[in-house]
Amino acid sequence: MASNSPAPEGIDVQEQPTAGAWGEWNPTEDSARPPRGKHRVLKQRGGLARSSTVLGVGVIAAVGAGGIATAQDRPQVAISLPSLPALPDLPEALGGADRSADSDAGSARTAESARSGIIPQQADRRSDAGELLRSRILQQAESQHEAAAAQERAEAERLAQEAAAQQARDAQAAKEAAEKAATEAAEKAAAEEARRAQEAKEAAEAKEKAERAARTAGSFFLPTSAYTLTSHYGDSGSMWSSGHHTGLDFAAPTGTPVKAVGSGKITSAGWSGAYGYRIVLELPDGTEIWYCHLSSMSVTGGSVAGGDTIGRVGATGNVTGPHLHLEVRQGGVTVDPLSWLTARGLNV
């Protein structure tokens, strides 16, 4: 940096050629203009002309914060410092003690520079500005790092939330699928159970029907045994007061057992004119079975089961020989006993 200090009055300083870029300039009598006025010229000391008012050659080139270079190490350049903006207050860490120390150090450097003829530069201020800039850069880098870390944490949290939400959706879907499967299995099991129940019901009904048919076939019995059919229903002749035969005759020896053709109750038992001794058996459906010409009666009232002996074959009443006259009446009207017995599975 060139000095702006004015030359002492009466002395003109001219630019002189140098041996080097910044070689020493030793003013001599030949290179100096003759002084005007009354001035005193100092004698040379050791080959150098010195004056308290003449700025010796020396330029301080501040290169960074690394130190001060002498004028012999750098080419001659004009250095101009830009106007620096007002620096903010340094942190509290750089308190009054530090500033006092910096002030003392600056005073020492100024004194040293004055003794050496070198103008001090604003190295300290640049060092402080560089430190402040470095601090700001570090703070900005730390802020960016924290922002990036926060963004990474936010992204990780978002991914975790999405994963948790996906897991929840998967769990809900699995739960719904399990519930649906359980419902379908329950419905299928219920349908299968209903089908089995229906089959069991149908089988029971079929069994009941078969059993009923078996009971029907097995619950009816022939009225007597060891017999011979001598007269059939509808035969005509003078022997019957109605002009035709109203029953079926089973010729058998006197005393042959007479049985109930089915379960029922005895509604009448006793003498009945041309029918001799007669027993009337009423079946559950209202059908009446008449047993006539009996020699004796074993049961004269109450309920009987199919196959029970209720009397004996005889020849009482209007007869020509011992036999059982059997009539079947439905609604008070006679029907063919042979057809009725055959319809109930009996082989007459």
Image (spheres, rainbow, N blue to C red):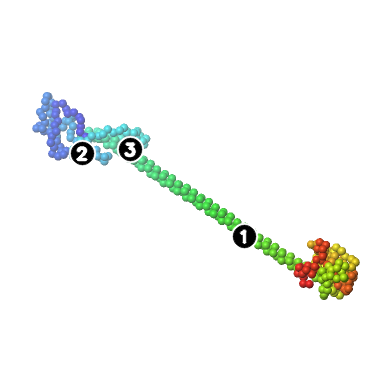
Q: Are marks 1 and 2 in contact (CB under 8 Å)?
A: no
Residue 268 rendering spot, x and y as whole percentages: 87, 64
Quadrant holding the C terminus: bottom right
- The residue under label 1 is 192
Per the image, the residue denoted by label 2 is: 70
- Residues packed near mark 3 inside 10 Å, few (<14), some (14 to 19) or many (20 plus): some
Residue 162 x %, y %: 47, 48
Query: Where on the picture, by quarter, is residue 84?
Result: top left
- Sooner in the amino-acid sequence: mark 1 or mark 3: 3
- At mark 2, the secondary structure is loop
Residue type (three-letter) at the residue carrying disc 1: Glu
Q: Amino acid at mark 2?
A: Thr
Residue type of the residue flagged with mark 3: Leu
Res 185 quadrant in image: bottom right
**Which residue is at 25% across, 34% downward?**
81
Q: Secondary structure at mark 3?
A: helix
Mark closest to the chain's N terminus, 1 or 2: 2
Choose between 237 and 222: the one closer to the eye.
Answer: 237
Secondary structure, mark 1, is helix
Q: CA distance from mark 1 to mark 3?
A: 87 Å
**Residue depicted at x 18% and y 39%:** 75
Give the number of the mark in front: 3 or 2.
3
**Residue hosting label 3:** 132
Q: Position of residue 176 (x, y in %)?
A: 55, 52
- Which mark is in front, 1 or 3? 1
Q: Is residue 312 visible?
A: no
Circle 1 residues within 10 Å: few <14, some 14–19, many ≥20: few
The residue closer to the viewer here, 174 or 44, is: 174
**In screen coordinates, is 22 left or right of 275?**
left
Tally the numbered discs: 3
